Image (cartoon, rainbow, N blue to C red):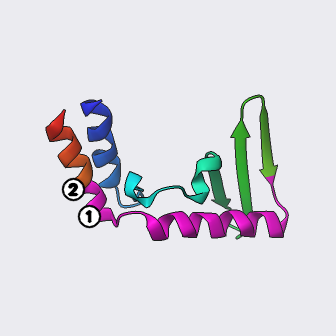
Amino acid sequence: MRGQLQRLLDAGSLRNVSVQVLPFAAGAHSGLSGPFVLVETPDHEHYGYVEGQGTYVLHSDGPTVSSMEQLWGHLRMHALNIEDSAQLIRKVMREL
């Protein structure tokens, strides 16, 4: 697990990657329904991708993608900032 945490820190040091931790203290949140991916093309088209057990969907309709983008904003708002996230990851690594 220590190696996985170090990989997160390494990825977070890249200029195009931000690692933010949503702590358990945040409680129940809208991201508990599962992972999703947001994509913006060079032509500024927006897509949302959801994958689950035995299913996958690429959304291109505006209202659905907008809802996913709002969910993403909500999750980021409750997550630790980049520096605090890195500190928490380092703390967990020390405790292992």
| 3D distance between C-alphas at marks 2 and 1 | 6 Å
Mark 1: amino acid = Glu
Q: Residue at x 71, y 49 (%)?
A: 49
Q: Compared with residue 61, is residue 57 higher up or lower down, i.e. above or below?
A: above
Q: Residue furthest right?
A: 61
- Are the two marked residues, 2 and 1, in contact with CB atoms closer than 8 angstroms? yes
On screen, residue 23 versus residue 60, left or right, reads left
Q: Which residues are magenta?
A: 59-86
Q: Is residue 60 magenta?
A: yes
The secondary structure type at the circle numbered 1 is helix
Q: Position of residue 92 (x, y in %)?
A: 22, 43
Q: Residue at x 26, y 48 (%)?
A: 89
Q: Label for residue 83?
A: 1
Report which quarter residue 96 is drawn in: top left
Q: Position of residue 37 (x, y in %)?
A: 63, 51
Q: Compared with residue 29, is residue 33 higher up or lower down, i.e. above or below?
A: above
Instruction: Residue under label 2, please give it.
Output: 87
The secondary structure type at the circle numbered 2 is helix
Mark 2: amino acid = Gln
